[in-house]
Image (spheres, rainbow, N blue to C red):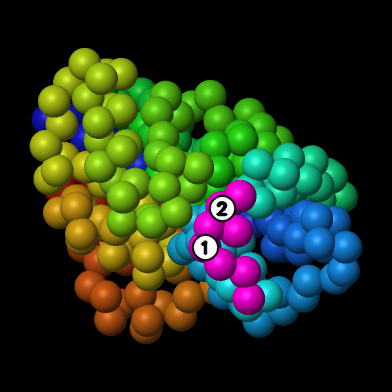
Amino acid sequence: MKRLVLFDIDETLIHSDGAGKRAIEFSLAKFFGHPVDLTGHSFSGKTDPQIFNEALNKLNYSLSEIESFFDQIYPLYLGQLEIEINKANTYKLHIGVLELLESLELADWAHLGLLTGNIENGARLKLKQFSLYEKFEIGAFGSDSANRLDLPEIAHKRANTHFQKPFVNSEIVIIGDAINDILCAKHYQAKSIAVNTGVTKKSDLMKHEPHFLFDSLKDTKSMIEAIMA
């Protein structure tokens, strides 16, 4: 038996106290020279490029214009993200994260990776506060594709190469807090484990029928059993 276990970051592993939202607003305001308010804009389960695209579409920029901005906006975003993380009041790991990761690290059948909408350098910044980034040997990121549905295949290919093991789709487990985490797992015929630690209502997660749904990552034994199932 083997499993490729892919974790989302925001509101699955960590609570970032809105650091990402503030950094995105700052980078857009800095680039365009006027405030950009994203209050009420949904970030849940989206890739960073998707969020930037949606914000810039509201400002009536074309897709080609938006893509040309990224090389200048991303450095602004990453610089401010580090500042926002350092000054956040409640930047923390969700309950059960360390215990689950430690158990999986000891299991010779478990191979850990990330599947996140964060661009890769943003993911590194968010996890380095807890020395977690190095626990994940491979990953698929928003910088790989703006479309989250593309990310399982990217992670799968990287895992096959890195671990030198040919995982099949049914051996891939995607753990996340948002509807889009469930959808990308189903799209790729992978196992979906949803955790109700984000902003999405539990009833809304249930409607999309993940294979398993937990209130949190706290119950390590039950999580391991679900991953192995």
Where's residue 100, x and y in %?
43, 40
Place residue 193 in its image quadrant: bottom left
Stretch in magenta = 60-68
Write the residue at 52% across / 62% down.
63
Above or below: residue 78 compared with residue 211: above
**Mark 1, other Cα within 10 Å: few <14 / some 14–19 / many ≥20:** few
Between 151 and 34, the residue placed more toward the observer is: 34
Numbered tag placed on residue 36 in the rendering: none
Q: Is residue 34 left or right of residue 194?
A: right
Where's residue 116, x and y in %?
46, 48
Above or below: residue 4 compared with residue 20: above
User: Are circles 2 and 1 on residues that touch, CB within 8 Å?
Assistant: yes
Tag 1, which secondary structure? helix
Place residue 192 in its image quadrant: bottom left
Above or below: residue 213 compared with residue 142: below
Where's residue 66, x and y in %?
59, 58
Above or below: residue 227 compared with residue 216: above
Where's residue 42, x and y in %?
57, 74
Which residue has dot 2 on it?
A: 67
Our reading of the magenta stretch's main secondary structure is helix
Between 64 and 182, the residue placed more toward the observer is: 64
The amino acid pointed to by label 2 is: Glu
Between 35 and 91, the residue placed more toward the observer is: 35
Write the residue at 56% across / 30% down.
133
Between 86 and 81, the residue placed more toward the observer is: 81
Q: Quadrant of the N terminus?
A: top left
Which residue has dot 1 on it?
A: 63
